[in-house]
Amino acid sequence: MRARIVGTGSYVPERVLTNADLERMVATSDTWIVERTGIRERRIAAPGEACSDLGTKAAERALEAAGLTAADLDLILVATCTGDSPLPSTACLIQHRLGAVRAAACDISAACCGFVYALAVGEAYVKTGLRHILVVGAEVMSVITDWTDRSTCILFGDGAGAVVLGPADGDRGILSSHLHSDGNLWDLICVPGGGSRIPPSDKMLADGLQYIKMKGNETFKVAVKTLEESARETLSANHLSMDDLDLYVPHQANARIIKAVADRLELPMEKVVLNMDRYGNTSAASIPLALDEAVRAARVKDGSLVMIAAFGSGLTWASALIRW
Ligand code: COA
């Protein structure tokens, strides 16, 4: 039995941080940011607004779209690297907020690939007989962003997206998922402090080790390579070609990365979903947020062939092909 997405939802915080705002914070310009990344603005969570707050709102919208209630859920999977706190899982907090009394709940840690990883885990559990699984990608990246570092602070934003999985009938559903990682590249993107290696301390905070460190150029090259490879792998595993694809929903890290991938794949940009101009890189939230917008804008229709694909810290990369 296949798993199918039966509802999508998303939520972004109200506050908008524009490139003009960033010009007042670091030595940068709107022109530089737009040319190098395609990002124009991003959303920032309000003080005290945490990952589970965003995730719960996205989940409520996905449940509503699915015509289900929280009591229908068997499992809640939350992809995040900016959970409310180390314990308990953000998934348990969302379970509590939703009142999903029957569900099991846990978080999945795969950075920007987290949603695609979580979707693959959910898919596997539907195949073993669970009926309704909530998969959430939610991030408050603004708390791990160094707002004095112009090479990273222009990139990230906050948001959440969610889908509900259920059993599929006929030819529809998730056709395949493809998960990869290469831990040799762990230091391309990392948050060095705050865990068991470098626990929180005054020195850790003074050194800024609670913030994202990134080798931007190297990450760019690996991203283009892995996204191209995973698109080809995913289509060939299903004996389909690029022409069969109706919509490509990539991780919204950088418009230049996505355009380079589309060029290599000879994929017309009309088939590519881009929304990083309004949200920046929201890590695990980026794909479900873009997917929900595409669904609500009717860019995804019954029978559409949709590919989602991500890369991120780890290094991880992952993709899935969905017959809607
Ligand atoms: N504004 C203006 N100038 C900036 C800047 C900013 N915000 N950030 C960096 N620069 C400067 C650099 O200091 C450098 O100046 P120099 O030549 O005088 O040394 C110059 O711009 C070029 O820097 P570089 O890092 O080579 O730029 P780039 O074209 O690689 O773009 C990124 C930088 C971060 C936009 C790009 O590398 C990128 O998007 N990488 C992938 C990141 C990513 O996707 N991460 C998330 C993975 S999930």
Image: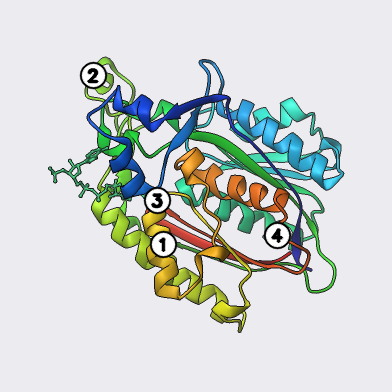
Q: Are marks 3 and 4 in contact (CB under 8 Å)?
A: no
Residue placed under numbered mark 2 in the picture:
206
Q: Nearer the viewer, mark 3 or mark 2?
A: 3
Whichever of callouts 1 and 2 sits on the residue coming sooner in the sequence is 2
| x, y percent for residue 9 | 70, 42
Q: Which of the 4 image quadrants contains residue 190?
A: top left
CA separation, marks 1 and 3? Answer: 9 Å
Q: Are marks 1 and 3 in contact (CB under 8 Å)?
A: no
Counting other residues with Cα less than 10 Å from the Cα at mark 3, is it few (<14), some (14-19), or many (20 or more)? many
- The reply to whether residue 108 is visible in this rendering is yes
Disc number at residue 311?
Answer: none
The quarter of the rendered structure image containing the N terminus is bottom right
| x, y percent for residue 144 | 39, 30
For the residue with label 3, is its CB less than 8 Å from the closest atom of ligand 1? yes
Label 3 secondary element = loop
- The reply to whether residue 109 is visible in this rendering is no
CA separation, marks 1 and 2? Answer: 38 Å
Model colouring = rainbow
Residue placed under numbered mark 1 in the picture:
259
Counting other residues with Cα less than 10 Å from the Cα at mark 1, is it few (<14), some (14-19), or many (20 or more)? some
Q: Which of the 4 image quadrants contains residue 203?
A: top left
Question: Does 142 sit above or below residue 307?
Answer: above
Taking the spot 43% from the left edge, 65% from the top edge, the residue there is: 227
- In the rendered structure, which amino acid carries the disc numbered 3? Asn
Closest to the observer: 71 or 30? 30
| x, y percent for residue 286 | 53, 46
CA separation, marks 4 and 2? Answer: 47 Å
- In the rendered structure, which amino acid carries the disc numbered 1? Lys
